[in-house]
Image: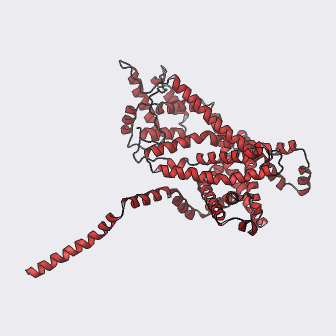
Amino acid sequence: MLSANQLMHDNHHNVEEEKKQEIPIATMNQVPRHRRSCASLCKFALSPITSCIRYAWNNKIVTTIALLSTASAALYSLTFLSGKQPQDINSEWWYSMSDAIQFCSVMNACISITVNLLTSTKYLPLAGVKLKKNLTHTCESPSLFIKNNICLLVGLSVGLIYGTQSYNAFLWTNISLSIISGITNFLSYSARRYNSIVDLIEKFKDLFNSDVRFQQECIKQLYHLKPEYVEEFNLLFHDKPINEESVNLFLTTLYDKATEALHKKPVVSLFYEKTRTDLLRDVLHMTARVGVGLFCAIAAIPIGIQNAYDGIQLLLPKNVSDNLTNANDALKVLIGVVPGLANGIFYFISGYECSESLEDMYDAIRENKKYLITSSMALVLNALTATGYYVIAQATVNESNILNIQAPTSLGNALPIIYATAVFITGVNNTDGLFAKVNPIVHRVGDITEWLERHKLPSEKISVLRRHAFFSPKASVTKAADDIELIPSGLQIV
């Protein structure tokens, strides 16, 4: 049996142990709440950069190629504040700037290479996979052979623009480094633009594909599904994976229910109807998207034509290049017009689609206020990155060029600003991946809508859906003024 002294000693020992265990909890509680919030927000805001660093460490080859292809843009950003070109980089140029300008120039270059590296590491692996897939089927038929070779030529011509820019950026270093940088940029952008032109042709063909148009109508119906039915189908399909079979089952079930509702007294519709105000809003929205796309294309075409001509001139033998220098400007423009126009098309697409990225950004902020930090950082960093392209355009207008757009004129002074703005817009369009799936709750209707936007249902399944009783008397699928749209990323309707 334990004595009283032993019991008291054990109790005292237990109390001391409990106090020791409580110390970490107490210490944690003593940390001010605002400090914990700041740490959480900083971690959240920097998560895309930390993810990029982890990816870079695990994929060293892709990162090296991406680094070489983005270094030239960083050099243009480095010289932006000094008003010089990368060719002017030397010790005299560096010491002619104040300490503040030196610091800001280095920070601007670091931001440029970080943003472009994030974009390149995202798109380069996809470009490689798609390039291999597309080229594998080149010889399957004469039409595929012609299409792929035309797309490849267009991609190479556009890659020449960026290869020239990269080559010029490294002229202040060893010529070998300048050539390596130019070739790397040429190849990486050629692959990406080749894939883009293939995708563009497929989208154009889809405009005349009745199955794809029918699927687009189904997507519109899902956007205009009333909230009570959204919740009902969320619950019904919450445990099913998102694939071709489940999406087809979902659409069949939806149209079964919609057909039932049409036979009720009074008639019930699962979808909203449009008013004239909604139609006007849609027209204005489309006009704005086309206008932004045209702005970006018009800004990019002159720079693309000049850089493409410069790149072709670099590849020609010296005697041919000298003769071409003395040729008529119209011939020079003709040489660079195909890659310049092709580059303008890609800028048009980015400008046209930019509103979707802005909508995703707005929806993410509405869902989670933390995304205000991420979106603000994305906009600011893209704006700073665009300064490098301002320098590229400035180099074009400060020297004699084949389009005769000179700096003293109004157009010559405005072109660098317009081009940098277009690059900023295309950069915003590349932020789409930052704001996907911000709501942790899975909403199956939103997920299915997103799946349908990214994939095509087989023709046989489309044929079965087309014969559904719901489409016999054409049901109204448009939206009313009080419509609450379903967001494709699956965000919660509020």
**Color encoding of the figure:** secondary structure
Residue 233 location, quadrant: top left
Could you tell me residue 366's position as x and y percent?
45, 43
Rendering coords of residue 303 (x, y %)? 75, 47
Residue 144 visible in the current orientation? no
The residue sitting at the top extreme is: 265
Count of marks, rendered view: 0
Question: With respect to residue 210, does 184 lie above or below?
Answer: below
- Which quarter of the picture shows residue 429? top right
Q: Residue at x 66, y 46 (%)?
A: 421
Is 490 positioned to the left or the right of 199 in the image? Answer: left
Q: Residue 318 lies in what quarter of the image?
A: bottom right
Q: Is residue 37 left or right of residue 342?
A: left
Q: Evaluate whether residue 364 shows in this view.
A: yes
Front-lying residue, 312 or 458: 312
The vertical placement of 36 against 329, above or below, is below
- Camera-side residue of 88 and 266: 88
The residue shown at (41%, 27%) is 270
Where, quadrant-wise, is the C terminus in this rendering? Answer: top left
Q: Is residue 417 above or below residue 224?
A: below
Percent x, y for residue 58? 55, 63
Q: Quadrant of the N terminus?
A: bottom left
Nearest to the observer: residue 218 or residue 210: 218
Residue 394: percent from left, percent from top: 75, 51
